[in-house]
Image (cartoon, rainbow, N blue to C red):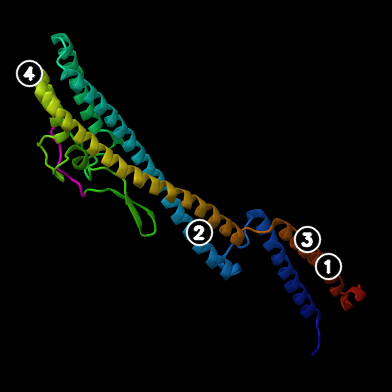
Amino acid sequence: MRITNNMLINNMMYNLSSNLLRTQKYLNQLATGKKISLPSDDPIVASKALKLRTDVAEISQFKRNTDDALNWMDITEATLSQMTELLHRAKELTVQAANGTNTDEDVFKIREEMAELKTQLISLANATYAGRYIFSGYKTDKPLLNEDGTFNIDVDNSEQIKFEIGIGDEININVPGSDLFNRTVTTATAGSKSEFIDTFDKILSALEADDKDQLSSLLGDLDDELNNLLRVRAGLGARMNRVELTAGRLEDDYINFTRLMSKNEDVDIAEAIMNLQNEENVYRASLATGARVIQPSLVDFLK
């Protein structure tokens, strides 16, 4: 087969283009910091990257869920803590009013403070987080109690708001108001009076009538409300511990999967620089070789 100048030149141009493409590959790696720009560059790396990116995205969402869950539960715990302090104060006042050594003015002051405690308890029952009422079950856009202590909505103990904090792992973050403000029934209906608030109303009525025997008997009701409140707080605390443990595990998973993703996708800068220098040398050599391929033709001698 006869070798023509056109064949030599075409081969030279093809080789120059190939060398230049490899040079561009390493330039892109250094510019982007990634091993590949297109799936076709390395299908295996691309496939692993998609899986790892999906895992990291899921973990990030679960982290957001746990953060939101903990914020909600922190607000709930703080509110329950205030209710506990309020109940302790109510019990102190009831014991003081039942001892029979108070003047009419003392009883009046106790009654006034007890009324303020009732008002504060109703306010705490309507506590919110991010504009949502935390004790209203599924109806987070409506307050739990009216100003007179009656339920504003229907609430059932089964109305549990659940957050997904892992694959197939859900946890309820709320405390239904029916569980907290009604000790003996699992459902609260709109218009009915809360048992919790009713205890305060009975104490206020006994203070109005200066019925010391009734006040003494109502101390047992306050103890029952306190025990119920502590039960609810214990359940909430156990769930908070679980969410906090999950949050710690998710943080570790996020770091590990991010490291794996980086190891799979990110280019080794030192290696890329070395490869780029090698390709530049090859390209320069191919240019020098190409200059020798283009030999003088007969036309050059005829000039």
Task: Give the SS element for disc 4.
Answer: helix
Instruction: Tell me which amino acid carries mark 2.
Output: Arg
State which mark lies toward you, 1 or 2: 2
Mark identifier at residue 277: 3
In the image, farthest residue toward the bottom: 1
Camera-nearest label, 3 or 1: 3
Residue pictured at 27% horizontal, 38% vertical: 230
- Which amino acid type is marked by label 1? Ala
Q: In the drawing, what numbered circle is on residue 209?
A: 4
For the point 38% across and 42% down, the residue is 70
Mark 1 and mark 2 in contact? Answer it, CB < 8 Å.
no
Badge 1, how many Cα within 10 Å: few under 14, some, many 20+? few
Q: Is residue 155 magenta?
A: yes
Q: In this picture, which residue range is highlighted in magenta?
A: 149-158
Q: Which residue matches tag 2?
A: 53
Instruction: Give the image location of residue 97, x and y in percent.
Output: 17, 18
Quick check: 243 left or right of 175?
Answer: right
Label 1: which residue?
A: 285
Give 272 or 192, whichever is nearer the viewer. 192
Mark 1 falls on what kind of element? Answer: helix
Tell me which numbered mark, 1 or 2, is placed earlier along the sequence: 2
Q: Main secondary structure of the magenta part?
A: loop
Who's the residue at 47% across and 49% down the image? Answer: 248
The correct choice, above or below, for 60 with respect to 40 in the image is above
Kindly report which numbered mark, 4 or 3, lies closer to the viewer in this rendering: 4
